[in-house]
Image (spheres, rainbow, N blue to C red):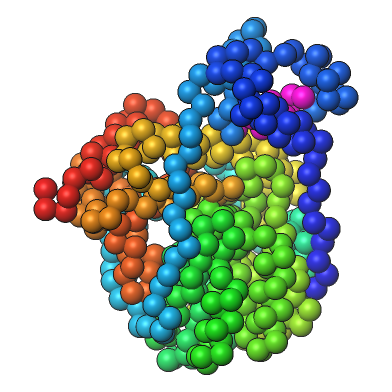
Amino acid sequence: MKRGKQAVIKRYEQVANGLAEQIEQGVYLPGERLPGVRRLSKQFSVSISTIMQAHQLLEDRGLIQARPRSGYYVRTSVWQAPEQPAMTNPKPKPARITGQQMAMQLSQATRQPGMIQLGAAIPHHSFLPTRAINRALLAVTRHQQRRSARYEFPPGSAELRQQIARRMLDAGCQVAPSKIVITSGCQEALALCLRAVAKTGDIIALESPTFYGLLQVVESLGLKALEIPTHPQHGISLDALKLAIEQWPIKACAIVGNFNNPMGYCMPDSNKQALVKLLRQHHIPLIEDDVYGDLAFDHHRPIAAKSFDTDGSVLYCSSFSKTLSPGLRVGWVVPGKYQEQIEYQKYITSLATPTLPQLAIADFLQRGSYDRYLRQVRGQYARQVAQITQAVSKHFPEGTKVTRPVGGFVIWIELLEGADALVIFDKALAKGISIAPGPIFSATQKYGNFIRINCAQPWDDRLEAAILFLGKLAHRRPSS
């Protein structure tokens, strides 16, 4: 697998960074108007369109705001972001997974009408291209009636696999359509991969904290989880993983390297390369979940760890659930040398992924609608994450720590010592507010004073009141 070119910082980002530095240095004070686009164009020796792109990026970062027919102004409430949580320190011992029943409770909360959905990482429908997807579904139903009524046995729709192969070039991966297997979402892709590389009792190395859906799959297959220390900006500790490999018979490693769930970081490319090399040296497959990879706040799609794969030992998983529609349940896996096992496991598990959603997404991608949508929604998520983080810093106790995502739409919050995330979860649920408590992101129910919040919700009075209420709960002691 050839690695694609690493992203180069674009000119508009350089301009945005320059203006941000001037704001931080006090060249432009809160409430002051920035120079006009023509003046900035001459100042930075760039086009007016480049200045406009830089303005958009600074808006997404929450540094400036537009005023109709007046220009751009430095925000009067430029705020200091909260401190980030430290590197995690889980017990260096494999464990059976416990306490995942609450994850089911969390998913059930999404069906309750009127619930403020800050728990499950599901975008509000207003952030999704629902009308465009519905048009694609209608077009496929009208023009491919016979095709849409039949099975698309593994590896799945040829049209969709071709479109995915083209998109994976942006992630640095040159993949033939024949090497892609369509699945029913990323969750099924992860389950298929674990079945292909491990058996009951085997040890799987995981980031800590990690996506609770992955923990549920590990638990259901009778596997043991080995939690590895993880940094909130750089990802899984390679030194700790190396020590774990020397100590335990690890059968696979699973990560969410791009805009990790729940911490939001993007693992540096050098770390991805070193991770793939380390695992290859020890003949350990890597299962990579890249479901958030298209949602970079800076509009640069990061490369995947798969791009450094030279022997087919990286199993790459993703889906369209976080970008197009959770309800369509369309994902895929690039299984490398495990393709035969994956296709067989897919067949005996569910025969095939539903045909109509596959053809509709292929049509949507072929028309170029996906890229237009991504350009819009990335900025929306950046603003939502910034606004909710700002609200948390305002309403939660002083000393609360919050991660600084660079993509996706979730934040990981460390509450004060002594706070009980499970108590907060129960009390919030009783008030119609769903959150994700920290213990479900750990095999051994660590992170008792952490919560994860889904920011992909439209900002309104109800959402602001919900953050205020959560802040009040965070101020209380567990006994109160």
Q: Judge whether residue 461 can be spotted in this image.
A: yes
Residue 130 in sight from this viewpoint:
no
Residue name at image x 67 percent, y 60 percent: 268
Image coordinates for residue 372, horizontal then vertical, percent: 70, 38
State the residue in front, 91 or 455.
91
Front-most of 340 and 398? 398
Q: Residue at x 37, y 52 (%)?
A: 414
- Relative placement, left or right, of 29 versus 396 is right
The residue under the point 75% across, 49% down is: 366
Position above or below: 107 against 397: below
Identify the residue at the far front of this view: 25
Residue 473 image point, x, y percent:
22, 43
Q: Which SS type dominates the magenta stretch?
A: helix
Q: Quadrant for residue 381, please give it.
A: top right
Tell which of 376 and 181 is nearer to you: 376
Image: magenta residue range: 51-60
Could you tell me which residue is drawn at 47 percent across and 90 percent down? 202
- Residue at the far top in the pictured view: 69
Q: Is residue 174 left or right of residue 454?
A: right
Location of residue 181 (image quadrant): bottom right
Residue 337's place in the image compared with 273, above or below, is below
| Place of residue 45 in the rendered image (x, y in percent of width and height, measured from the top left) | 88, 24
